[in-house]
Amino acid sequence: MVTATSARGRIDKRQAILAAAFTVFARHGYDQAGVQEIAAEAGVAKPTVYNHLADKANLFRHAVLAAAEEVMAENLAIAERLREPGGDLRATLEDVAYRMARVCAGERARALRSLAHGQASRFPDLIDLVRERTSDRLSEALADRLARLSLAGRLRRCDPALAAEQFLALLTGPLEARSRSGTRTLSTADTRTVADAAVDTFLRAYRPD
């Protein structure tokens, strides 16, 4: 009989394996990463990894998607700030943009993009699956928040999906350029500059007349 405690323990162990796998894959790439090293990183026996994830390919796929879910959860929590933005909308948008930029330019998100694109020939659907869990879900959440702000008269009437797409483009485009497609780490000052500039341009287009 499977108890709630044993089921929880199995879930926790699987999560630890996936986290360890992502760390090792990010460190060495798919081909050079070994299941034995992943097991050691997770603090489990090598057969335990196979019991949970069957093989290296399945392990890689689930590790990348788990990391994508974590990035998505971080950004969705940040977007929640726009549900009650307070009196200074610009300041709130700048804070949201800065925090999203930090996530986007962070080590985990950069490794996520690198692994998904680097293994596109072996896992051709993975880029789309990662995009669905990160940028697409974030864009949907952001569109909902911007629609509420538009209805409240704090932004001009607009297509919220398009507004969200443009907000994210204003943020991620310069981040990619300044970080040289994620190959260099941005300073706090650079990240803040990109975030503030994105918000300034966005508000010039979307603030009420």
Image: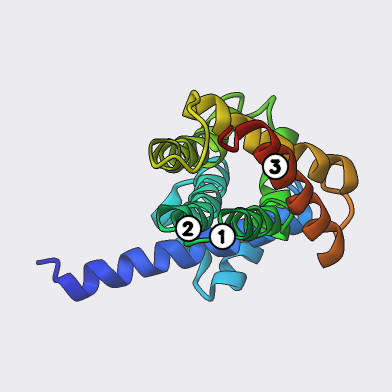
C-alpha separation, residue under disc 3 versus residue under disc 1: 34 Å
Q: Is residue 192 above or below residue 147?
A: below
Q: Which residue is mark 3?
A: 113
Tell me, for residue 88, which label it has, or none: 1
Are discs 1 and 2 less than 8 Å apart at CB? yes
Question: At 66% from the left edge and 31% from the top edge, which residue is drawn?
Answer: 205
Q: Where's the C terminus, which quadrant? A: top right
Q: 102 or 202: which is nearer to us?
A: 202
Element on which disc 2 rests: loop
User: According to the image, what is the colour scheme of the structure?
Assistant: rainbow
Q: Is residue 121 above or below residue 96?
A: above
Q: Would residue 167 be found to the left or right of residue 137 on screen?
A: right
* Mark 2: amino acid: Pro
C-alpha separation, residue under disc 1 versus residue under disc 2: 7 Å
Q: Is residue 186 above or below residue 152?
A: below
* Mark 3: amino acid: Arg
* Mark 1: amino acid: Asp
Question: At 76% from the left edge and 59% from the top edge, which residue is drawn?
Answer: 27
Looking at the image, is mark 1 or mark 2 nearer the viewer? 1
Element on which disc 3 rests: helix
Q: Which residue is mark 2?
A: 85
Looking at the image, is mark 2 or mark 3 nearer the viewer? 2
